[in-house]
Image (tube, helix red, strand yellow):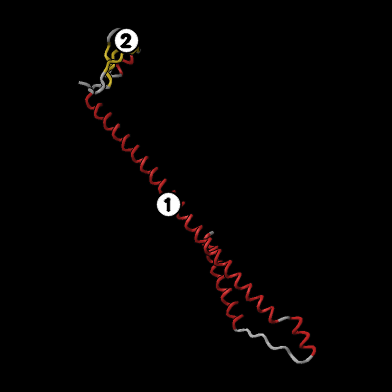
Amino acid sequence: MLNAASRDIILLQEILSYLGESLEGMDVPERPEDEAGGTLYKVLNMANMKRDVVVRVNDLRKLVNGAQHELQNLSSMTDVINTKQLEDVFKSVEANTKFLVDASGANERSSASLQVLPPPCFLLTITVCLSCCMKNPDLTAASADTFVWRFPPRSCK
């Protein structure tokens, strides 16, 4: 949007410079001697018309210059806002990185404490039928229908 406004202001400045150059080169003719030419000259009022157009061109130049300064102010404000948003993003990334570092440290500490513990090895008592005992070598008969199952099977010393 600011780029489009900037292009428009540049085009307006060019048009105003063309109008100004045209007005500088324009001479108002003298009043004709005949009555019809004199009446036409009086109706058209060429001298006042040229003066009015020159004044309007100068007014438009001032307005376009004001618009250009306003555009520069808006561009500066946009730069400030972009910088602020970028700072916010950097702070957010920094906070997230700190969180990840803290989480990684906690993970390492918990991993270190797990290395101190012996591997999980426990006996699980379950009730199964006798035919199941014969099919699973990890089950040993403790009584007629109760078996002890070592977990994990055959891996604990």
In contact (CB < 8 Å): disc 2 and disc 1: no
Q: Secondary structure at mark 2?
A: strand
On screen, 60 above or below 47? Answer: above
Q: Nearer the viewer, mark 2 or mark 1?
A: 1
Residue 73 position, x and y percent, is 50, 59
Give how far apart the Cα atoms at labels 2 and 1 are.
73 Å
State the residue at coordinates (23%, 27%): 115
x, y (%) of residue 155?
23, 23
At horizontal 30% and vertical 15% (from top left) the residue drawn is 124
**Residue placed most toward the observer, 146 or 47:** 47
Going by the numbered disc 2, the residue's amino acid type is: Thr
Spot the residue most to the bottom.
33
Q: Looking at the rendering, which quadrant does residue 98 occupy?
A: top left
Q: Horizontally, is 2 left or right of 117 in the view?
A: right
Q: Residue furthest right?
A: 35
Camera-nearest residue between 20 and 42: 42
- Left or right, 59 with respect to 134, comes to right
Sort mark 1 into few (<14), some (14-19) or many (20+) by Cα contacts within 10 Å: few
Q: Which residue is mark 2?
A: 146
Q: Position of residue 87 (x, y in %)?
A: 40, 48
**Residue that mark 1 sits on:** 83
Q: Residue at x 54, y 67 (%)?
A: 65
**What residue appears at the point 22 percent right and 25 percent down from the top-left corner?**
116
> Which amino acid, mark 1?
Thr
Q: Is residue 72 left or right of residue 109?
A: right
Q: Mark 2 or 1 closer to N-term?
A: 1
- Callout 1: helix, strand or loop? helix
Quarter of the picture containing the N terminus is bottom right
Q: Is residue 81 above or below residue 29?
A: above
Q: In terms of depth relative to the viewer, which is nearer, 78 or 47?
A: 47
